[in-house]
Image (tube, rainbow, N blue to C red):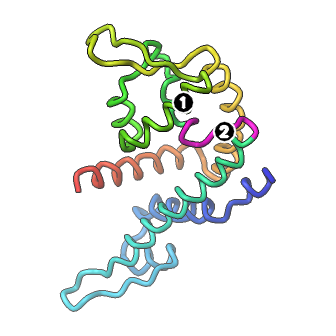
Amino acid sequence: MFQRVINCGILRGLIHLLKTLISVRRFNNMEEISARAAVTVHPSSDGAHSPAIAHKLFFRLYQTMNLSLRKATNVLRDKDMSPQQWSILDSLSRPDLQQGMTVNGLVDYLMVSRQSLNGVLKRMEDLGYVQRVINPEDHRSRMVQLTDLGREVWGKAGQQMKHFYDENLRHMTEEEKLEAIDFIERILANVKRF
C-alpha cells in the first residue's frame, strides 16, 4: 500500500509544473513557457493571455492537496491519527512552543475554522495527545499544548511522515524545493489578500 503513496502521479505532475515555473526565467516568450507546461495559451483580443496557466496551476494545487490528504490518511492509519491531527501535533511540537498556542493562534497558523479545529482538539484531548491550560499571559484564555503522550505519538508518526515527504519530493533538488516553497508562499500571500 505504501508503494502507491510513493507512486503518486498527481504529486509528480505538480512537481513538473513547479519545475516549469522555476525554469520560466530561462525562456524569452510565452510560447516557450506554455509549451513546457503543456498548456495552450490563447491571446485574447486585447493582447492579454488566457487564464489557462493560472487555472492549471490552481487546479494542480487543489488536486495535490486532496490527494496528499488521502495518502497521508493511509500513512497515518496505523497510528489511528488523521492528517488534521498530525498537523496540530506538528505545529505544537516546534521548540519555541513548549508553552503551547492559543486556539486563535492555531486557527491562524493552520488556516482552518475555529469550529472544525475545536472538534479535532476535543478528540485529541480525549486521546490524551493535547491539553488545554490557562494562558499565563492572559488568564481569560487557554493554551493548547502537547502532552508527553502527544509528543511520543508525534515522534513515531513523524518518522512515517518524513518518509512520505522524502519519497514524494525525491525528484527535486534542495534548491528546487526552496524555490517551490517561495512560489507557494507568494501564491498564499496573494490568496490571503484576495
According to the image, label 2 marks what residue?
161
Residue 63 x, y percent position in the rendering: 53, 64
Q: As shown in the figure, which amino acid type bears the numbered disc 1? A: Asp
Task: Place residue 16 in its image quadrant.
Answer: bottom right
Query: Of residues 83 and 7, which is closer to you in this image?
Result: 83
Task: Place residue 164 in its image quadrant.
Answer: top right
* Badge 1 or badge 2: first in the primary sequence: 1
Q: Quadrant of the C terminus?
A: bottom left
Per the model, the C-alpha gap separating discs 1 and 2 is: 10 Å
Mainly helix, strand or loop, the magenta region? helix
How dense is the environment of label 2, judged by Cα within 10 Å: few (below 14), some, or many (20 and up)? some
What residue appears at the point 28 percent right and 10 percent down from the top-left corner? 139
Disc 1 + disc 2, Cβ < 8 Å: yes
According to the image, label 1 marks what residue?
90
Residue 143 x, y percent position in the rendering: 39, 18
Q: Residue furthest top?
A: 136
Dot 1: element: helix
What residue appears at the point 28 percent right and 50 percent down from the top-left corner? 192
- Inspect the magenta stretch and tell me whether residue 80 lies in it: yes
Q: As shown in the figure, which amino acid type bears the numbered disc 2? A: Met
Residue 3 x, y percent position in the rendering: 80, 54
What residue appears at the point 43 percent right and 13 percent down from the top-left corner? 99
Q: Residue furthest bottom?
A: 45
In the drawing, does residue 118 fall left or right of residue 73? left
